[in-house]
Image: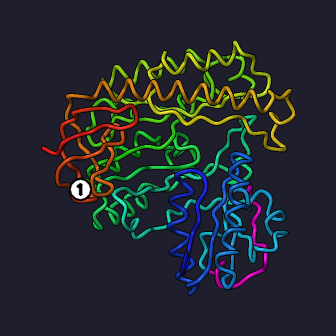
Amino acid sequence: MSGLDVVTFGCRLNAYESELIRARAREAGLTAAVIVNTCAVTAEAERQARQAIRKARRARPEVPIIVTGCSAQIDPGRYAAMAEVDRVLGNGAKLRPESYSRGTRIAVDDIRTLRETAVHLSDGFAGRARAFVQVQQGCDHRCTFCIIPQGRGPSRSTPLGRIAEEVRNLVERGVNEVVLTGVDLTDYGKDLPGTPRLGQLVRRLLAAVPALKRLRLSSLDPVEIDDELYRLIAEEPRLMPHLHLSLQAGDDLVLKRMKRRHSRRDALAVAERLGRLRPGIALGADLIAGFPTETEAMFENTLSLVESSGLAFLHVFPYSARAPTPAARMPQVPPAERKARAARLRAAGERALARFLLSRVGSTAEVLVEEVGRGRSEHFAAVRLEGAAAPGSIARARVIAADGAELLARVV
């Protein structure tokens, strides 16, 4: 490590914000530091962040270490107590340049009072073929397992004009694919004049930036997908045929205890509708294994959902108790069983992905080239490319094989 290093944990929104953190720190004149952008979703993510802080101090004893992100927002004292840490910034402070040039050892706002929805214009992601654009922040829902509202605050949205300005800025710098992201993306617009929905944002954004070649969406709550967004999924070729759903479980009682707003039947109906509107669409999902009170039969319902709903890309998490969430006070599944169930879900996901990739053999893919010889298809499948294709470009390629984890394709 050298110069200004930003170490990122967690979600796509964190990845986006890490780019902004780097820019804001440089604006403040900070040229040498390690900034750790933490995640609070699991205890393991927090453990890894603390490990990274200690490693950074050993590697770079001469530079300040600044800790920020959701875990730092929720429990700043824990990080301030680490001898390796020089400053702790909350999620509100981390995107303000002045936070990196002056201030107290701990600068953490009351996240519940934040109402800012600014899209912080970026200069693009250096060396990357795609970029993430934050359009929504915070969450008003209270799932019983989730601590993120305490780290991100209330739901707030960015007006379309500012989003279009950033996307136009990225496209002018050569970015071919943009991912719209947020903490609760499908809650977009409810706090804006006229209460636009996510579908309206997507339609107007694509019209406002006709040079944008590919648009993706990050995780969607299945009960909040609006009718206009369904229409765009069916009709708009620039909206990629890959969606990630926030499902979490496939058993109705577990979903109820999670305080989710959809049922197993709802999840299946959404998957069926998406498949009918966009044949061949690739679906992914977040799934939690070993939620409190989950029996083997309940887990089997989640396991069977993978095949029943045609999921291909899974993000599987063994349940991690997050005090003071309600789920942390429920009867817990033993950690070893959580881990075993997560392994079974991941294995089911590997089989599902292998089936999906095999179904693409013989087809033609439009591959966003991420580095020499590698990229992602429009379905977000990893692709190993034969033939010349410049990083950042979109290459048309014939899929000639699948090995279970990625496609092999030849540029045509």
Indicate the quadrant where residue 221 lies.
top right
Seen from the viewer's position, the closer of residues 315 and 385 is 385
Q: Position of residue 370 (x, y in %)?
A: 33, 55
Quick check: is 101 in the magenta stretch?
yes
Q: Position of residue 322 (x, y in %)?
A: 79, 43
Q: Quadrant of the C terminus?
A: top left
Region rendered in magenta: 98-112
Image-based side of 103 in relation to 395, left or right: right
The answer to whether residue 202 is above or below residue 81 is above
Q: In percent of the image, x 43 and y 30: which residue is there?
A: 283
Seen from the viewer's position, the closer of residues 338 and 129 is 338
Colour treatment of the image: rainbow
Q: Residues within 10 Å of mark 1 (few under 14, many from 20)?
A: some
The answer to whether residue 401 is above or below residue 122 is above
Q: Quadrant of the N terminus?
A: bottom right
Q: In percent of the image, x 28 and y 43: which residue is there?
A: 238
Q: In percent of the image, x 57 and y 50: which residue is there?
A: 11
Q: Position of residue 131 (x, y in %)?
A: 40, 57
**Residue 226 appears in the figure:** no
The answer to whether residue 13 is above or below residue 195 is below
- Residue behind mark 1: 393
Image-based side of 184 in relation to 161, left or right: right
Seen from the viewer's position, the closer of residues 227 and 341 is 341
The answer to whether residue 179 is above or below residue 53 is above
Quick check: is 24 in the magenta stretch?
no
Kindly state the secondary structure of the residue where label 1 is placed: loop
Image-based side of 351 in relation to 378, left or right: right
Type of residue at label 1? Ser
Indicate the quadrant where residue 338 lies.
top right
